[in-house]
Image (cartoon, rainbow, N blue to C red):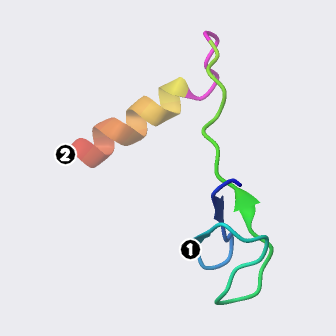
Amino acid sequence: MQMKKCPKCGKYTLKEYCIDCNEKAGTVKPPRFSPVDKYGKYRRMLKKSLKK
């Protein structure tokens, strides 16, 4: 059983469909680690801007 997140309302559930909005929930997994990180630059920029 995997945790899932509703793309419409953002709530987490263990079921296939969201209880509140009846939207199909998707899996919540972090992206795979890659030494060639295409989006690392943008993540660091976002983190830096949120830190201020």
Residue hosting label 2: 52
Res 7 → quadrant: bottom right
Residue 49 placed where, x, y %? 31, 43
Between the C-alphas of marks 2 and 1, the distance is: 28 Å
The answer to whether 9 is drawn above or below residue 12 in the figure is below
The answer to whether 23 is drawn above or below residue 51 in the figure is below
- Of residue 3 and residue 5, the one placed in the foreground of this image is 3
Q: Secondary structure at mark 2?
A: loop
Q: Residue at x 41, y 30 (%)?
A: 44
User: Does the stretch in magenta take in 17?
Assistant: no
Q: Residue at x 61, y 19 (%)?
A: 37
- Of residue 27 and residue 31, the one placed in the foreground of this image is 27
Amino acid beneath label 2: Lys
User: Does the stretch in magenta take in 38?
Assistant: yes
Amino acid beneath label 1: Lys
Locate residue 52 relative to residue 31 in the image: left or right.
left
Residue range corresponding to the magenta coloring = 35-39
- Of residue 33 and residue 2, the one placed in the foreground of this image is 2
Q: Quadrant of the N terminus?
A: bottom right
Residue hosting label 1: 11
Tag in front: 2 or 1: 1
Residue 40 placed where, x, y %? 52, 25
Residue 29 placed where, x, y %? 64, 44
Locate residue 8 relative to residue 47 in the image: left or right.
right
Q: Residue at x 74, y 68 (%)?
A: 25
Q: Residues within 10 Å of mark 1 (few under 14, many from 20)?
A: some
Res 6 → quadrant: bottom right
